[in-house]
Amino acid sequence: MTSPRTLLAALIDKLRGCNVHGDAEEAPAAILWTDPKGEWKPLIPLLRQQLPELLCLGDYDPEHRLGPALWLRCLVDRSLPAPDAAADRVPVVYLPGVSRQELRAGEGCPWALEPLIELMFRGSLWLQRNGRDWTLAAFLASGDALGLDLANDQTTKAALSRALSELAVVPLEQLRGKKLEADDFDALLADDPIRDLLQWMADPPAFQLRCGEERWSALTSI
């Protein structure tokens, strides 16, 4: 039986679908995934399990395939060994806090990112059809991605961001056929607010500590 399709599965398909390089017969050297606001970061732990070719810009942590731009460039160019599970795959390079404009700025690009500039020409950038970076809201609502009916207010976008890790594994069919608003996303984090309220009343400090930031934000929003 086929597993229900989820946001996470759709994201992986879209990233791997960038495995083309214009009219060239060869695959791109890498797929560059820019995320100027870091909106996608909550999904990185899940993606590491299912996308072995994923590399991430950040502080040096090779166990989690995380490191600075020069180290990433060495992995892409195979001057350092790639993880065994990803040896035959095109690397997906996730760049939190980096926009496509920064990479395309040439001499104006931050020096720490300069090793990645050349990969724009040998690789592919995962961008919307209009050339913009993919945001969470755009990915959910765009007909080129999930095509869901998403409210466009800031409260909904904040709730979407809070619940992203939980939303990522919800079958997409459960999200279709209605307008998705803040309450829908908050419910993923706080599915029984009456129970939670009673537990909070019994011991506020301990309950808030157990909640974590995202769940507590969802509860206060409800």
Image: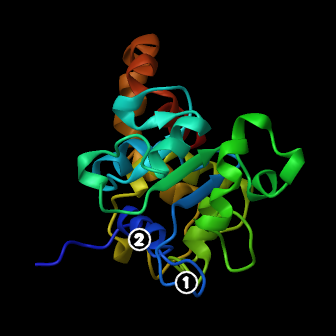
Vertically, is 154 above or below 121? above
User: What percent of the width, then of the height, locates residue 55?
Assistant: 46, 46
Q: Residue at x 60, y 83 (%)?
A: 22
Report if residue 125 is visible in the image: no
Q: CA distance from mark 1 to mark 2?
A: 25 Å
Q: Of 135 and 193, which appears nearest the observer? A: 135
Which residue is labeled 1 in the image?
A: 24
Q: Nearer the viewer, mark 1 or mark 2?
A: 1
Farthest left residue in view: 1
In the rendered structure, the answer to whether residue 61 lies left or right of residue 88 reads right
**Residues tagged 1 and 2 counted as in contact (Cβ below 8 A):** no
Residue 117 in percent (x, y) is at: 71, 53
Residue at the farthest front position: 79
Q: Residue at x 41, y 41 (%)?
A: 193
198 is higher (above) or lower (below) than 118: above
Task: Name the side, left or right, on which 49 lies relative to 64.
Answer: left
Instruction: Kindly identify which numbered label has been placed on residue 219.
Output: none
Image quadrant where residue 5 sits: bottom left
Sequence-wise first label, 1 or 2: 2
Q: Which residue is mark 2?
A: 10
The vertical placement of 106 against 180, above or below, is: above
Q: Is residue 148 visible?
A: yes
Q: Amino acid at mark 2?
A: Ala
Residue 125 % position (x, y): 62, 66
Place residue 81 in its image quadrant.
Answer: top left
